[in-house]
Image (cartoon, rainbow, N blue to C red):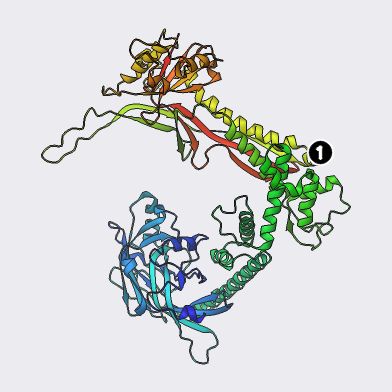
Amino acid sequence: MPDEITGQQEGAAPAEIIAASAGPDALSEGLRAVGSHPVDPGVEVERFAVAVEFAPSSADNDNRTIDAVWYTGAKVPRFDWRTGEEYDLVLSMQGCRLDRLNNGGPVLDSHMAFGVESQMGVVRRAWAEKATGKATLQFSKRDSVTSLWNDVRAGIIQNLSPGMWIYKKVDTTPKNQERKEFTAVDWEPFEISLVPVPGDAMTTFMSAAGTKPPAPAVVETQRASAQKEKPVEPITQAAGDEARQNEAVLAAARDEAVKAERLRATTIRTMAVPFKLEEKFVNAIIDEGVSIETARERIMTKLAAQYADNPTNGVNVQVTMGADATYKRRKGMEAAILFRGNPGDANLRDAGNEYAGLTLVDIARECLDAAGVKTRGMSRNDIARVALQGRFGAAEYFEGGMMTTSDFPNILANVANKTLRQAYEAAPRTFVPFCRQVSAADFKPINRVQMSDVPTLPKVNEKGEFHRTALADSKETYSLATFGEIVAITRKVIVNDDLQALTRVPAGLGQAAAQLESDTVWAVIIGNPNMADGVALFHANHHNLNATNALANAALGVARAALRIQKAPKGTILNLQPRYLIVPAALEQTADQLIYPINLAATAVTGVVPSWIQSLTKIVEGRLDAVATVGVTNWFMAVDPSQIDTIEYCYLEGQQGVYIETRQGFDVDGVEIKARLDFAAGAIDFRGLCKNTA
């Protein structure tokens, strides 16, 4: 170990985080658990496991408690990835900090800390006796833990492993011993986990009578059951020889595992060298214990993030001259393609000036040349085909004879994505002002329970007791649905230099997504569905259907009065104030004359158009004209959704609006772009809307 690590003083940041190698995410979860002990980012993180065994005779089934010996001074082989050396590590119980365990340290499943469901129990007490660490564990009585507890009592699950931080270790290598040996003199266990593979075979759960761990010369022939302790018989000499043979086999297996791990780490480092990735990033991949294939995918994902459209998207990009040139080239090519589809945009013209006038095949050739692919002698068809492959390593094309990557598929996908999203955002959606936007975590039915009104705040009695309000029984329900389409940018599009397919088709998908949202929301108003009380949204029983009330100055006053006197379920007058005037296209001019008069119309009271009418926001929707049940003479009035629920529209959580995915074509020779929309809408309350018929 480097001196700056082994020589840290007490109270310093941990030199090592020790977590069992029981899962790829155990390390990251250990980092989250550090809390007040931040890890020095310049220190490589190591992982370490000390496993113990179950001796379930001390199990208390009523309280689900059991005693354990979780460390007995085992010497564990370690490998330092920074120096490439193997060494042995011993934990000194004199330097063990037990505060975290005694303050309710968790009992986890294989060091996984993804959420509270991963916690199987809690450490009720932890203590040290000379070189031994002991603890009393209590398991949860949740149904999901019962089966594990039963296996613990039956001796099926027999191994534990504490996760720990090491703050300081010293070199205690015996004289003339070649293999290094260190002793952790300041360390802290922070959790104990159930694991399948033991490390310290001398540890065990204590019996109810407090039986000490067996001496090294005595080996148990069987484990005590949870119901009855059985005497431990020493094994014969022949059995001892067999045990030593088994130990030799295990030692050989450990050696093979060390060699395989060393090969895995070396291979991952070799893959990362050409890309000059941060050492911290590479070390983290190695420490997670992922396969070489998974590591390769992680590296490619890291590279893609570095060169993404938005270089400030939260990724700590290592900027180099090569990366900067690649980014500029990609952005310039994208701007040039977009400018050809939208020649009126001066910003695109300036950004893509270097590649102005190039066809799609010309840009594909530029990308291949930048990636080191020889394009001389290649036909237009071959250039399009090879550039669309993205990754390639054919010796006849690549000057270096090894795998490389073309930017061309990403450039095409970005162009299509931008045109799709821009078209989606530009499409008119007239429902947004008077509806409420929400999100849902899944596709289960969305239930909206209506709050009962409280007429007044009741006076608190002398005992200080507060009145409890309740929820009304009325409940509105709707659920998300998924809509989508896939567009392919094929080799034929590139060869034919078909910009319409590259820009206009994705733009059409974006407009279609926006139209779908509008169709869904306006269908609620046009369809006049039944509410949870079995009555239509607009109905005389709801006091929001004003018959023979053609759009005029006086009619606006009738609609306003209907909203003002709407009552909550318990009879409270809501006094709602109208905000939006919703009309079909046939009534747009009439609405303009009422809200924005050139000559102020006289009235009996003020002599001018009332200010509240002039403050209304006009919403014109052509869908209202096309439906006979609505008619071109019917109009609506709505309050602001901040006053009361009206109509609610919902997206899947984290995916507001149209969601775009791209991939290298499998069914087609090119790039596929998928536009997906998870969307739904429903009427939540009838009181904030009113319909007026002529």
Residue in the image at 40% along x and 29% along y = 641
Instruction: Name the residue beneath numbered marker 1.
Output: 496
Circle 1 SS class: loop
Residue found 35% across the figure and 19% down from its top: 563
Q: Residues within 10 Å of mark 1 (few under 14, many from 20)?
A: few
Near-viewer residue (548 or 153): 548
Residue 131 appears in the figure: no
Amino acid carrying mark 1 in the image = Asn
Q: Nearer the viewer, residue 205 or 398?
A: 398
Decide: is 136 above or below 450: below
Residue furthest bottom as drawn: 176
In the image, residue 644 lies at what x, y percent? Answer: 36, 28
Q: Quadrant of the C terminus?
A: top left
Residue at point 67%, 65% (across, down): 271
Q: Nearer the viewer, residue 234 or 301?
A: 301
* Residue lying at 35% horizontally and 31% vertically, measured from the top left: 449
Residue 259, above or below 689: below
Estimate the x, y position of residue 216 in percent, counting from the top left. Answer: 42, 80
